[in-house]
Image: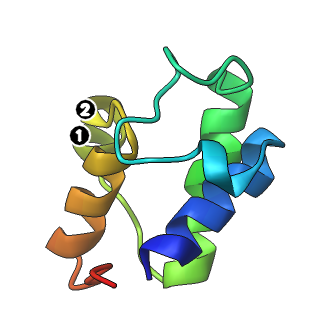
């Protein structure tokens, strides 16, 4: 399911899925700005049928953090 997460990130950021890894972040992806962060959050919540807390949102710095937060919500992304 990591591929599913990577696919969502790639689609929102308008980049190739091959450019996504667990360390991908606003510092490594130029299109990952505040607006696309909001879009990504909305897409993730819709796709995985969950809601992130404000703390989870503000503390998320990269794809690895997204995975960690999804796991907290009972969504395991191990392939």
Q: On screen, 26 above or below 70? A: above
Residue 62 figure quarter? top left
**In the rendered image, which residue does mark 2 sit on?**
59
The quarter in which the C terminus is drawn is: bottom left
Q: Nearer the viewer, residue 72 or 52?
A: 72
Q: Which mark is residue 55?
A: 1
Q: On screen, 74 above or below 23? A: below
Residue 30 figure quarter? top right
Which residue is drawn at the image coordinates 36% and 41% (left, top)?
Answer: 57
Q: Nearer the viewer, residue 55 or 12?
A: 12
Which residue is drawn at the image coordinates 84% and 43% (left, top)?
Answer: 14
Which residue is drawn at the image coordinates 62% and 24% (left, top)?
Answer: 29
Q: Percent position (x, y) of residue 76? A: 25, 83
SS class of the residue under badge 2? helix
Nearer to us: label 2 or label 1: 2
SS class of the residue under badge 1? helix
């Amino acid at each position: 399911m990591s591929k599913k997460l990577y696919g969502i990130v790639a689609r929102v950021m308008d980049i190739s899925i091959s450019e996504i890894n667990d360390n991908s972040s606003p510092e490594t992806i130029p299109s990952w700005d505040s607006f696309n962060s909001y879009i990504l959050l909305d897409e993730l919540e819709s796709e995985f049928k969950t809601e992130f807390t404000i703390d989870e949102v503000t503390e998320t710095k990269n794809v690895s953090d997204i995975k960690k937060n999804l796991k907290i919500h009972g969504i395991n992304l191990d392939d």
